[in-house]
Image (spheres, rainbow, N blue to C red):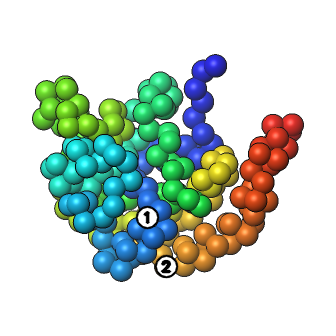
Amino acid sequence: MSAKLPGWFSKVKNKLCYRTGEQALKNIFDTGAIFPNDGSFPYTYPQSKVSFARIHNLVSLFDFSRQTEDECTKHIHNWYRFFFDHSPVTIVIFLDRELLTANLMTNEKAIEMTKGTFDPIFLPHVEAFYPQPIPCRAFTGYLIICSVYETIYEYIPHRGAFPEIFRKVDDFLIKHKEIYMDPLNKLEKELEK
């Protein structure tokens, strides 16, 4: 079976973005920026503690502008799970590339710095990095992705901090409550279509 890009990929294609959960997003709005994790935030994954971003005190981002759809599909196993790993939803924040370009560290630069060893660890092809806090004014939109059934998502265009996103998440959960209450039954219904 060949890999297939998820429906929400059309929203992240050619975009620079950051993904997070609800509580972390509240902290981002409270502080006014996305900060590099200097160890003061809990790590999502065991490898995060020794990741390229952590060791170099960088914000870890996804950059889907440098690859073709075929390349993204080929490497989907490296990045896909990060977009539905928060519960009950993963929230993707889209970023204004023009505001960040001057200091954006590309995947190619990270490969050059590690001499191609990927040590410390980072995602090949799609991970990019930023050396400073990313202010909320650089946000250009949001994508809510269901953690139970990741083909269900909602795109919200909005520039800057958007505290109403939490109401949007609540509405999203109510709208899709059947999925959260009985995901296997809903999946069976979807597969029957």
* Residue drawn where x is 50% and y is 39% of the image: 80
**141 in relation to 3, above or below:** below
Q: Read off the residue under disc 1.
A: 140
* Residue drawn where x is 49% and y is 79% of the image: 163
Compare residues 87 and 193 and report the one nearer the observer. 87
Q: Secondary structure beneath disc 1?
A: strand
Give me the disc on residue 163.
2
Under mark 1, the amino acid is Thr
Quadrant in which the N terminus is drawn: top right
Distance between the Cα atoms at labels 2 and 1? 14 Å
Local crowd size for mark 1, using a 10 Å CA cut-off: few (<14), some (14–19), many (≥20): some
Compare residues 66 and 78 and report the one nearer the observer. 78
| Whole-percent x, y for residue 51 in the image | 25, 44
**6 in relation to 55, above or below:** above
Task: Please state if 162 lies on the left or on the right of 35 as rendered.
Answer: right
| Earlier residue among tags 2 and 1 | 1
